[in-house]
Amino acid sequence: MRPWPRANFPPPALQLTSGVLKDGGSAPHAAGVQWFFKEEIKSRGWYTGELRKVAVRMRRTILRDAGLDFLVRVADNLFHGDMLEEKVFGVFLLEKITDRLEEAEFRLLEKWLDRVSSWADHDALASYLLGPMLVAAPKRAARVFVWAGKKSRWHRRAAAVSLIRGARLGKFEREMVRVSAALLGDQNDMVQKGLGWMLREWAKYQPKRAVPYLMKIRENAPRLVLRTACETLPVAQKRRVLG
């Protein structure tokens, strides 16, 4: 990946992207978006489906005209901002092409966790970029243990959420058990919801393995984690786990 300094970053693609994002939103929807967040956010009012469509078209154009390295730099610059759509757009630019990214890009994306400002840009990053890259190279999954020990709630949430893609494929059982042990005592609701989400997907796709684990931790797990983890279970199993 070419080391382009941000200060000398070629501007045309960024200017074009910024213009598109400014013009395509909805003010009424932007006002409604705030309802979903505890934190105050800045939104241009894009609907996710439309934002993704525009990102796909922009990705094709940049790859054709400037190449992968340049695309990664555009995405990196977008995720530096404080506007929700710009961050998510940066994620969408790289979504579906993570198989073309290597260790340098993974380390770069890991640093994006320091820039997260809401669960929306966090979950886009963890679900669409970090998660697929863990599946592509399972040795990277060792990083989740580092994230689980961070002071930042977004790193701790990522330790769980980034394993969901693998959980749906029957992977990362050892990692999920170890991350759960590290996060069960976490008092932050964002972390608890992320952990519960991970356990829910494990229970959905591997119930014979996950349900006994839920039974094992039910006395010590926060209620929010257990309720979330049981959402897709049959009623009888849900009652057993929740007691």
Image (tube, helix red, strand yellow):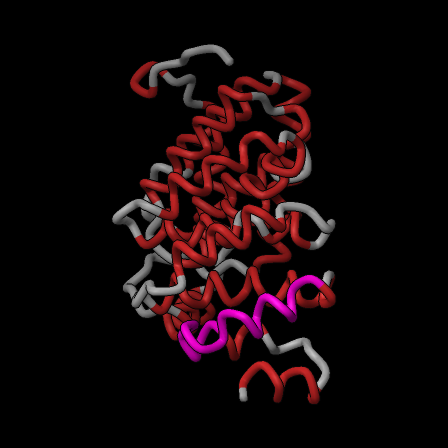
Predominant secondary structure in magenta? helix
Closest to the observer, 62 or 73:
73
Residue 122 vs residue 54, the one in the foreground: 122
Tell how many labels.
Answer: 0
Residue 128 as seen in the image, left or right of residue 119: right
Q: In percent of the image, x 49 and y 35: which residue is there?
A: 142
| Residue at image point 51% right, 67% down | 196
Given residues 7 and 200, the one toward you in this image is 200
Residue 232 in magenta? no
Report whether 59 appears left or right of 225. Answer: right
Query: Residue placed at 61% from the left, 78% from the top?
Result: 231
Instruction: Establish if 163 lies above or below 2.
Output: below
Q: In this image, 173 relative to 146: left or right?
A: right
Q: Quadrant of residue 42?
A: bottom left
Left or right for 2, reference 99: left
Q: Position of residue 181 (x, y in %)?
A: 43, 57
Residue 62 is situated, as x and y percent measured from the top left of the image, at 61, 25
Q: Evaluate whether residue 160 shows in this view.
A: yes
Residue situated furthest left in the rendering: 151
Which quadrant would the C terminus be assigned to in this image? bottom right
Query: What percent of the width, then of the height, locates residue 172?
Result: 62, 46
Q: Is residue 59 visible?
A: no
Measured as percent of width and height from the top left, residue 199 is found at 57, 64
Name above or below for residue 158 compared with residue 1: below
Magenta segment, which residues?
A: 209-225
Image point 54% across, 37% down: which residue? 141
Q: Residue furthest top?
A: 2
Q: Is residue 25 above or below residue 103?
A: below
